[in-house]
């Protein structure tokens, strides 16, 4: 949403918090943020492309201020009508600008339409949206829980966690044993769920509780929309589990790894640190640190070193 006041170049670069170089007018101001093709003189925008295509996009945009790669070489004509801010990572820079200047802050509080267990321990700065159910849980400072979320008892949620609408946390997983007659007998699910600080969980994701220990989501990990995390799975810190991925029960994902769109990890499989699992991959065997795997079944296709 547009800012209520004019934002100066200095305010923009301060919010980026990264190395930069400014070309053109340093007294420019903006009131809005926009895509590069749609921007006008009152907008800040960014260009993440490199090479001649990116250079032409920067030259052609009508934006008042453009965040772009510091690899570009400009002439004086390129910044007569606009201000250019050259940085090593334009997408990260504009993301920080948006967070500081163009994002509404969600206010703490519990919606009257939500049901909260009387034994739940919830920090007063937490936001809980409408029609949510919170069982006997612990929820840390600054966490935002949107509407229609169901959190079962025995869940521990850290600080500054974001949980989008429709998420279910702590339900029983598919723990069954087939008995002599071929019928399925339930294996009791006695564990809980631990979600560490700075985690984000996308809409309609399901995080199952542990069978005997806990299901654990490590600090800073991001789980996409419509993902399923099986019982007793352990995901390390700063992982990216992209939308519609399926992690089987007791699987393990090492720190800094990525599971791409629609991938499926078999139960009890161990994925190492800094691994990339490609789109739609079906992983049936353990994967060592630093590997790239994809395919059905997934095979090693390279290393992540240097990426």
Image: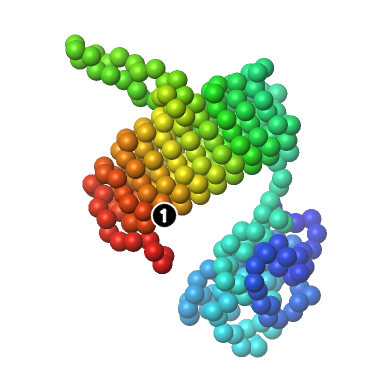
Farthest-out residue, left: 181
Residue name at image x 67 percent, y 60 percent: 97
The answer to which of 92 and 203 lies nearer the viewer is: 92
- Tally of marks: 1
- Would you say residue 146 is visible in this rendering? no
Query: Callout 1: 10 Å neighbours few (<14), some, many (20+)?
Result: many
Query: Image quadrant of residue 102?
Result: bottom right
The answer to which of 257 and 60 lies nearer the viewer is: 257
Side (left or right) of 4 relative to 227: right
Q: How is the image coloured?
A: rainbow
Say which quadrant the C terminus sits in: bottom left
Residue 200: x %, y % from top left: 55, 43
Give the secondary structure at mark 1: loop
Query: Image quadrant of residue 82?
Result: bottom right
Residue name at image x 57 percent, y 84 percent: 73
- Image height check: is 282 above or below 67? above
Instruction: Check disc 1 and report the residue beneath it.
Output: 274
Side (left or right) of 24 relative to 200: right
Residue name at image x 26 percent, y 42 percent: 284
Residue name at image x 47 percent, y 78 percent: 51
Residue 271: x %, y % from top left: 36, 46
- Image height check: is 269 above or below 14? above
Query: Image quadrant of residue 219?
Result: top right
Side (left or right) of 48 relative to 1: left
- Would you say residue 110 is visible in this rendering? yes
């Amino acid at each position: 949403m547009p800012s209520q006041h004019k934002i100066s170049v200095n305010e923009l670069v301060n919010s980026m918090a990264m190395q930069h170089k400014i070309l053109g007018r340093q007294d420019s101001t903006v009131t809005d943020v926009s895509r590069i093709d749609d921007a006008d003189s009152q907008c800040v925008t960014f260009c993440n492309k490199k090479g001649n295509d990116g250079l032409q996009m920067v030259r052609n945009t009508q934006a008042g201020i453009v965040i772009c790669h510091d690899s570009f070489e400009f002439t004086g004509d390129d910044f007569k009508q606009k201000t250019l801010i050259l940085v090593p990572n334009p997408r990260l820079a504009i993301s920080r600008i948006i967070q500081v200047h163009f994002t509404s802050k969600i206010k703490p509080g519990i919606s009257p339409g939500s049901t909260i267990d009387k034994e739940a321990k919830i920090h007063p700065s937490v936001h809980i949206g409408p029609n949510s159910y919170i069982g006997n849980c612990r929820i840390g400072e600054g966490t935002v829980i949107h509407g229609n979320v169901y959190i079962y008892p025995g869940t521990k949620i850290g600080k500054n966690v974001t949980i989008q609408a429709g998420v279910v946390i702590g339900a029983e997983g598919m723990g069954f044993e087939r008995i002599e007659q071929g019928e399925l007998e339930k294996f009791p699910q006695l564990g809980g769920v631990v979600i560490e600080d700075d985690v984000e969980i996308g809409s309609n994701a399901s995080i199952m509780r542990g069978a005997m220990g806990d299901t654990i989501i490590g600090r800073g990990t991001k789980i996409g929309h419509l993902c399923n995390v099986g019982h007793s799975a352990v995901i390390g810190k700063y992982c990216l589990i992209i939308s519609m991925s399926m992690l089987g029960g007791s699987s393990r994902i090492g720190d800094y790894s990525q599971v791409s769109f629609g991938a499926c990890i078999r139960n009890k499989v161990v994925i190492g640190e800094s691994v990339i699992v490609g789109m739609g991959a079906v992983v049936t065997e353990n994967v060592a640190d630093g590997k790239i795997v994809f395919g059905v079944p997934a095979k090693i296709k390279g290393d992540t070193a240097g990426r």
